[in-house]
Image: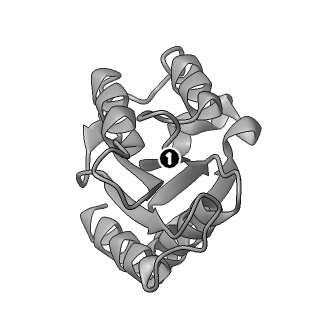
């Protein structure tokens, strides 16, 4: 059975909701999926996953500091080359919001991971949410799409 790891950082719980919806979609597609906060990742277990998903809220047009720190540590992880990856973010609706997902995706690609699907964003209504209606269902669908690729 294919295995996925969904790693996230969440300030107000919105990115966490997306991570769980993504994992639910992966699981309904027949993939074993674990959801882990970025600070709890066990780097020695990363080589066992087929898909690594990384999510962050947008902070100052970029990924959050905990996710950036995780990606820095990820550079030294063993056995990631050739694995599939997917990045996602949460942000407010603004043309000035930027994208953490794009920046995470670039770093994952630079480390030798194969991007399974271009990064996706979900809109939060106001600084601390809630998520825009339908966002969790959209991410469940994305999880099912990703499961078909494994």
Q: How many marks?
A: 1
Q: Quadrant of residue 69?
A: top right
Q: Residue at x 35, y 43 (%)?
A: 99
Q: Quadrant of residue 16?
A: bottom right
Q: Residue at x 67, y 40 (%)?
A: 38
> Seen in the image, is 139 located left or right of residue 20?
left
122 vs 67: above or below: below
Horizontal and vertical percent for residue 126?
A: 56, 64
126 vs 106: above or below: below
Label 1 crowd bin: few (<14), some (14–19), many (20+), radius 10 Å: some
Which one is nearer the viewer's eye here, 47 or 115?
A: 115
Residue 104 in sight in this render = yes
> Seen in the image, is 22 located left or right of residue 105?
right
Which one is nearer the viewer's eye here, 146 or 88?
A: 88
Residue with the mark numbered 1: 49
Q: Quadrant of the C terminus?
A: bottom left
17 vs 73: above or below: below
Residue 1 in sight in this render = no
Q: Quadrant of residue 128?
A: bottom right
Horizontal and vertical percent for residue 24?
A: 54, 77
Q: Residue at x 30, y 51 (%)?
A: 119
Furthest residue in direction top, as rendered: 76
Horizontal and vertical percent for residue 29?
A: 40, 79
């Amino acid at each position: 059975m294919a295995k996925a790891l969904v790693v996230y950082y969440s300030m107000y719980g919105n990115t966490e909701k997306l991570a769980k919806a993504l994992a639910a979609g992966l699981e309904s597609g027949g993939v074993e999926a674990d959801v882990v906060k970025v600070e709890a990742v066990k780097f020695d277990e990363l080589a066992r996953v087929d898909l690594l998903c990384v999510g962050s809220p947008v902070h100052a047009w970029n990924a959050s500091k905990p996710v950036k720190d995780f990606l820095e540590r990820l550079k030294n992880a063993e056995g990631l080359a050739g694995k599939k990856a997917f990045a996602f973010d949460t942000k407010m609706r603004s043309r000035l919001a930027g994208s953490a997902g794009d920046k995470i995706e670039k770093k994952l690609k630079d480390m030798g991971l194969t991007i399974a699907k271009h990064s996706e964003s979900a809109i939060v209504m106001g600084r601390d949410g809630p998520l825009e209606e339908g966002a969790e269902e959209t991410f469940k669908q994305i999880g099912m799409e990703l499961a078909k690729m494994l």
